[in-house]
Amino acid sequence: MSRKHKFDLTHLVHAGALKDGETVFFVSDPAKTAVVSKQPNGEYKLKVGAETTTVFAFAQNLLGMEPPNHASRWLRNQAGKTLYELWHADDMAEAA
């Protein structure tokens, strides 16, 4: 995953950074969760109860406003890595 690519949840799943059915947590309130879910068209989105949504829309709903920085910074996996960190993992490894 690289800065050259725009954020794509489907790409994170295909790269192995997230799994279909994996729960992601809102950084500010881990009780608020969503599940990575494959859609009939092959794309991955977030499932929140019966609703299917994007990472941006889920973060916006939880924050009550447009995220002040990238929406992927507001959601994390079970291990505590934000989706933003997973997305830029290759960039961070190259910088180290």
Image (spheres, rainbow, N blue to C red):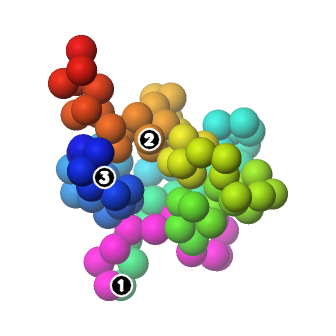
Looking at the rendered image, the quarter that the C terminus falls into is top left
**How packed is label 1: few (under 14 Cα within 10 Å), some, or many (20 or more)?**
few
* Residue most extreme to the top: 96
- Total labels: the figure holds 3
Q: Name the residue under label 3.
A: 12
Task: Say left or right for 26 vs 90.
Answer: right
Q: Distance between the residues labelled 1 and 3?
A: 18 Å
Farthest right residue in view: 64
Q: Quadrant of the rendered structure where residue 5 is?
A: bottom left
Task: Looking at the image, tell me whether mark 3 or mark 2 is earlier in sequence order.
Answer: 3
Amino acid on which the number 3 mark rests in the picture: Leu
Q: Which of marks 2 and 1 is in front?
A: 2
Front disc: 3 or 2: 2
Q: Name the residue under label 2.
A: 84
Residue 78 point in image, percent of width and height: 49, 35
Question: What secondary structure is marked by label 1?
Answer: loop
Q: Residue 78 vs residue 17: left or right?
A: right
Say if mark 3 contacts mark 2, CB within 8 Å.
Answer: no
The verdict on residue 51 being magenta is: yes
On the image, the x and y values in percent for residue 34 come to 59, 56
